[in-house]
Image (cartoon, helix red, strand yellow):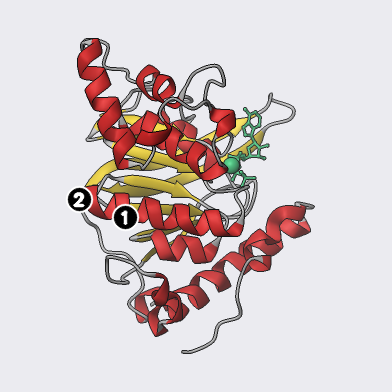
Amino acid sequence: MSAAVATGIAAAQPARLVDVDGVTKCFGTEDDRQICLESCSFGIPRGKLTVLMGPSGCGKTTLINLIAGYELPDRGSVRLEGAPVAGPGSDRLVVFQETTLFPWMTVYGNVAFGCKVKRLSQAAIREKAERILAKVGLYAFRDKYPSQLSGGMQRRTELARALINDPKLMILDEPFRGLDAMTRELMQEFYLKLFEETCLTTLFVTHELEEAIFMADRLVLLTYKPGQVKEILDVDLPRPRHFSMFASKRFFELHDHAMSLLVEESKKAFAAGCTSAFDQIAGARPPAGG
Ligand SMILES: Nc1ncnc2c1ncn2[C@@H]1O[C@H](COP(=O)(O)OP(=O)(O)OP(=O)(O)O)[C@@H](O)[C@H]1O
Ligand SMILES: [Mg+2]
């Protein structure tokens, strides 16, 4: 019996929106072939927040690209509601770390531009955009340009631009990286509240283990090169989440268990010359409580 099963941390099998099944993805030519992901399988449960973690270079963004349909697997399949993902769609939207806002458009212009449902009238798009801007707390800033916003506001504009399409799956690839610590905490709280209100199925990538546990219903840990699923953990902290949970016994149990797995993989990445492999370790607090 694995340690995770023994501690009751191993995940059960809830209803899935997305199935990643035996996915292998390689890059490079015949002579210089690199196996990025190998036989990678996991599900994204409907209405849950799934966090993907692993050392730098283990293939997290590649997995996102496969789920978003920007790339196709060499072997295996990615399925959305049982149907193979053959390309991008507005039912799966990605918010990346880098801003992709148009600097020449206002906040309103960026959000309305993101509306992929072109059959909607201008009036309907306006009503929808304004409702979403109010939801993300940016209605008063709708006529500002991205350069006039704080980092956190820019992130929220990106989220609004995705939310206007009512995606079935929201994909966030390290969306809060690069923000200062205070803004990052506010954004974690903001996204959690949004998620807990809407139960919008979410796939979230982060390098921060504390952030991962704070946000997740389930945590998918990947191995370093080739990327495979090392373990899937159920994060059974109650919702709504609150920062006080950082001091709970369960938080420390989950943190300890996930950290030991990540350290194993980060050491492999470090040995292979990847200097950012210790992100998770450097960002970690020593476990206390217990
Ligand atoms: N289009 C590509 N062509 C060649 N190699 C690629 C391509 N995309 C990704 N790779 C390689 O695949 C591996 C995984 O990359 P990926 O960006 O998915 O990792 P990651 O886990 O997201 O890393 P990070 O945590 O640093 O964002 C890396 O070695 C990367 O160089
Ligand atoms: Mg990445």
Quarter in which the N terminus is drawn: bottom left
Q: Earlier in the sequence, mark 2 or mark 1?
A: 2
Task: Give left or right: position of 83 versus 158.
Answer: left
Q: Is residue 130 above or below residue 189?
A: above
Pick out the residue farthest to the right: 273
The amino acid sitting under disc 1 is Lys
SS class of the residue under badge 1? helix
Tell which of 69 and 268 is nearer to you: 69
Q: Residue under circle 2?
A: 15
Q: Is residue 88 above or below residue 9?
A: above
Q: Residue under circle 1?
A: 193
Residue 154 visible, this angle? yes
Q: Is residue 126 above or below residue 245?
A: above
- Circle 1 packing at 10 Å, graded few (<14), some (14-19), many (20+), is some
Tell me the quarter of the picture where residue 249 sits: bottom left
Tell me the quarter of the picture where residue 169 sits: top left
Give the residue displayed 26% in from the left and 63% down from the top. Answer: 12
Q: Position of residue 229 (x, y in %)?
A: 47, 54
Residue 222 visible, this angle? no
Task: Give left or right: position of 49 versus 220.
Answer: left
- Choose mark 2 or mark 1, whichever is in front: 1
The amino acid sitting under disc 2 is Ala
Give the residue displayed 34% in from the left and 46% down from the top. Answer: 202
Tell me the quarter of the picture where residue 82 sits: top left
Q: Position of residue 152 (x, y in %)?
A: 51, 45
